[in-house]
Amino acid sequence: MIARLSELIAPAYREVHRDLLGGGHREYWLRGGRGSGKSSFVSLEIALGLLRDPTANAVIYRKVAATLRESVYEQMLWAIERLGLGAHFRRKLSPLELEYLPTGQRVLFRGADDPGKSKSIKLARGRFAYLWFEELAEFSGMDDIRTIRASILRGEGRAAVFYTYNPPISQANWVNEEALAVRPDRLVHESTYLDVPPQWLGGDFLAEAETLRQSNERAYRHMYLGEVTGTGGQVFENLALRPLTGEELSAGRAYNGLDFGFAVDPDAFVRVGYDPRTRRLWLLDEFWGVRTPAERLAEEVAQRAGDEVVRCDSAEPRMIRQLRDFGVNAVGVRKGAGSVAGGLRWLQERAEIAIDPARCPQAAREFSAYAYPAGAGGTFLAEFPDRDNHTIDAVRYAMEEVALGRGAHTIARQRDAPRGRSWNQ
């Protein structure tokens, strides 16, 4: 029996289906936990896409070729059977391939064991209109993905690239960091098994999920809800990656901080909102640039801060003077032993640090990936890492006045804490 499309595409994916039909985006990043329906959705869209466009072909990748047959190949067979198309496709096992008999369109299956081999893939007719990377977290990084894309997506016509994955547990993983990048041609969609009709999953699946929820909630949130729960070593457990509210965007006073780059390190400016009543902090804007000339850096900062005070790394008095010469109200922050640990702990004690990845992608990446260094036996060292923390330093500088306003004795008490850089370094 041929199922109706509304019985095959879960409600959570209907907006993505309409966006795909309208050519809204080029990339579709579909993230979700186990049973969220993302692979079923993509297989259906590829099969339907071949019917709509007789010049369209598809290629589906997994990192390891040996995993293709029992995963995406079977998934595509499921899709064409549910659409009533099984008799119209020729199935090949060596190499894995599906051919739509009326037109000769093909669905190819490849492993990315050697991404360079993608250059040898050729089509006798048509073009690759669909490219699917399944289990994206298995791939080594975006360099491999770009190599494959450059080899596959050639010629005229619109193409859609699907990325399906369960988010890795650590935000520092390349997949989670890349998903934070805001691009006009990219749609990022999240779903869980709770968005899928329960009868599609069956009682055993639901029972397994509930058992894990009761026995290990953290593992349940990662495996079934697709949450980036972390390894337990995250410095900022109060971080929230979300859009800012209208109230936050229109808040009165803001605070500005600037960390100067050196060599390949970036200059990082942030503009911060803070509510002392609720102890909530949020990032309003950022600028990030490598080897930025002083005049341009001043323009970027002045555009965001106006004539407000900008608290800067006082280890660079020459840069502060240059910014002031260009009209920026730049001042150096104070120095003090143990003040880095004190400033970071002050940030940890806020009720929430809210960052919108669309507004402040670099800050979202750094804050979410900032973790204690790992020690032996799965433990973490009680020290703050001194790397990939440029926007974090800028936030510390911006909030120096407020943090010190809690009382100088509060910072002084941190002098016996593990030492990192000074507050202004």
Image: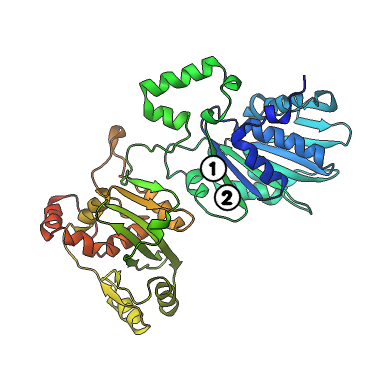
Q: Is residue 293 visible?
A: no
Q: Which residue is mark 2?
A: 143
**Where, quadrant-wise, is the N terminus in this rendering?**
top right
Q: Which mark is residue 140?
A: 1
Q: Are marks 1 and 2 in contact (CB under 8 Å)?
A: yes
Which amino acid does the dot numbered 1 rest on?
Answer: Ser
Q: Which mark is residue 33?
A: none
Q: Determine the residue located farthest toward the bottom in the rendered image.
A: 325
**Residue lying at 44% horizontally and 65% vertically, measured from the top left:** 288
Q: Is residue 424 visible?
A: yes
Q: Nearer the viewer, residue 138 or 423?
A: 423
Crowd tier of the residue under label 1, counting other residues whose Cα lies within 10 Å: few below 14, some 14–19, many 20 or above: some
**Residue lying at 39% horizontally and 57% vertically, measured from the top left:** 247
Crowd tier of the residue under label 2, counting other residues whose Cα lies within 10 Å: few below 14, some 14–19, many 20 or above: few
Image vertical order of residue 35 relative to residue 259, above or below: above
Q: Helix, strand, or loop for circle 2?
A: helix
